[in-house]
Amino acid sequence: MQSMKEGAANAAASAKAGMEKTKASIQEKGEKMTAHDPMEKEMATEKKEERKAEAELRKQEAREENAAAKQAARAGGHTTYTTGAPGAAYGGATGHDPRV
């Protein structure tokens, strides 16, 4: 059961990161279209790369948190799974997942 929860939480984190990366690419295209010089276009590309790197970092952090929650559950602790969004853990402070 814990593996399924971890897998679902990891899938949600991956999906969120994918959406953030896509959004960064779309924003870059818009910024490049309105840019008037090559420097602005380069800055748009750099911003996109930063956003994508941050999304990937958040995804990895969520995966680590989910793995730790799974280990805690095995040890008899409370479980909290994240979606990769800051403050978006299932169950809040109690560690209780109301969806189960």
Image (cartoon, helix red, strand yellow):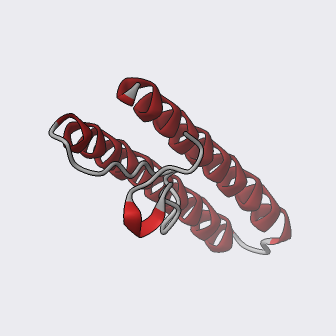
Which residue is pictured at 74% across the width and 61% down the height?
27
Q: Quadrant location of the N terminus? A: top left
- Relative to 20, is 92 above or below? below
Q: Position of residue 36 (x, y in %)?
A: 79, 75
**Residue at left offset 51%, top offset 55%:** 49
- Front one among 13 and 1: 1
Q: Position of residue 77 (x, y in %)?
A: 22, 49
Residue shown at the point (39%, 64%) measured from the top left: 94
* Marker count (numbered): 0
| Horizontal arrangement in the rendering, residue 33 relative to residue 47 (left or right) | right
Residue at far left of view: 75
In percent of width and height, residue 42 lies at 59, 64
In the picture, the quarter occupied by the C terminus is top right
Residue 4 occupies which quadrant of the picture? top left
What residue is at 67 percent from the left and 67 percent from the top?
Answer: 38
Dividing the picture into quadrants, the one containing residue 99 is top right
Percent position of residue 10, x then y: 46, 36
- Of residue 2 and residue 45, the one placed in the foreground of this image is 2
Of 75 and 49, nearer the camera is 75
Does residue 51 sit above or below 73 in this rendering? below
